[in-house]
Image (cartoon, rainbow, N blue to C red):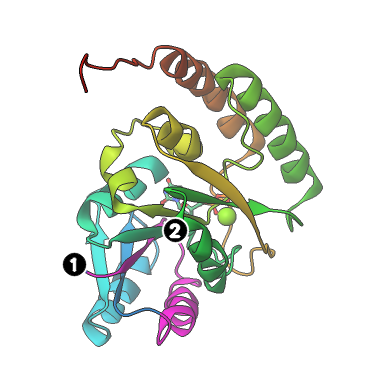
């Protein structure tokens, strides 16, 4: 069992892969006893698969998983969580909009909490994306009844028990902090840095995210209300 697993979902990110590996390695090497980098190729159609296999050959800390076909970001994250073995698990997007060094901004909080969600305080995205994200978070909080400032922040750190508690469905990678709370874990949000996407393109538009996300938020709100609480007598 390694101390830390860093997991990234990858769909057509050929121009980010080398840099991603470099930045993660520079960030964690020497700072943690042992680590693995789990890269989940979600059926990329560009050169990502080839580049990932090269990386796995050259660095024993890299573990690569290839999907047969594009199956979605939640599927990629779910497979990464299941195939990883770290006592702690960090999630990051392959586009490097969040900085792998910020894992260590989150790390001190994991002592008393179970799940630390990054919070992009200064978003470096297009105006449309910033506004839709702000509205999205507001609507999500209203529908789920939870209070998460930035549920979609790609940088997250959790204990193994949290990763093992998830039973994810499509789209639910957007609700990981709320789902952790539903599963009985302590969650906190901590500020991380954010930068513009340097290579490749976003895989989502405003609409394919908003409408599906709305239905999902209703379901999460329902789950949250139906959590069962009980205490066995005499314990
Ligand atoms: N991604 C994936 N499968 C998909 C869509 C996206 O694995 O079907 C990955 C993508 O490569 C990236 C992360 O999920 O690492 C987030 O995607 P993106 O950066 O396009 O989303 P945004 O940051 O624009 O919300
Ligand atoms: Mg991104």
Snapshot quadrant of residue 223 = top left
Task: Look at the image and tell me whether residue 171 can be seen.
Answer: no
Q: Check disc 2: other Cα within 10 Å, few if <14, some if 14-19, many if 20+.
A: few
Side of 105 relative to 37 (left or right): right
How far separated are the C-alphas under marks 1 and 2?
Answer: 19 Å
Residue at 55% x, 74% y is: 101
* Quarter in which the C terminus is drawn: top left
**Residue at which label 2 appears:** 111
Q: Is residue 21 in the magenta section?
A: yes
**Residue at which label 1 appears:** 1
Task: Look at the image and tell me whether residue 118 can be seen.
Answer: yes
Q: Which residue is more in the foreground, 214 or 205?
A: 214
Side of 80 relative to 173 (left or right): left
Q: Check disc 1: other Cα within 10 Å, few if <14, some if 14-19, many if 20+.
A: few
Residue at the farthest front position: 234
Q: Which residue is more in the foreground, 75 or 159?
A: 159
Q: Which residues are magenta?
A: 2-31
- Is mark 1 in CB contact (under 8 Å) with mark 2? no
């Amino acid at each position: 069992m390694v101390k830390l697993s860093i997991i990234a979902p990858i769909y057509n990110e050929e121009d980010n892969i080398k840099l991603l590996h470099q930045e993660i390695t520079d960030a964690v090497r020497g700072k943690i006893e042992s680590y693995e980098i789990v890269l989940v190729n979600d059926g990329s159609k560009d050169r990502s698969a080839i580049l990932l296999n090269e990386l796995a050959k050259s660095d024993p800390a890299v573990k690569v998983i290839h999907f047969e076909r594009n199956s979605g970001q939640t599927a990629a994250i779910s497979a990464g969580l299941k195939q990883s073995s770290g006592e702690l698990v960090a999630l990051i997007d392959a586009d490097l909009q969040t900085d792998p060094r910020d894992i260590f901004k989150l790390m001190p909080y994991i002592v008393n909490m179970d799940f630390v969600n990054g919070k992009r305080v200064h978003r470096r995205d297009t105006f449309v994306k910033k506004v839709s994200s702000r509205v999205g978070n507001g609507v999500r909080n209203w529908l789920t009844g939870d209070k998460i400032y930035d549920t979609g922040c790609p940088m997250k750190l959790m204990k193994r028990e949290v990763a093992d508690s998830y039973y994810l469905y499509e789209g639910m990678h957007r609700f990981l902090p709320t789902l952790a709370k539903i599963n009985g874990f302590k969650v906190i949000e901590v500020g991380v840095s954010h930068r513009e996407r340097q290579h490749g393109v976003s895989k989502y538009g405003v609409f394919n995210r908003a409408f599906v996300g709305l239905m999902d938020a209703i379901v999460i709100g329902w789950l949250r209300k139906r959590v069962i609480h009980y205490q066995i007598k005499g314990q």
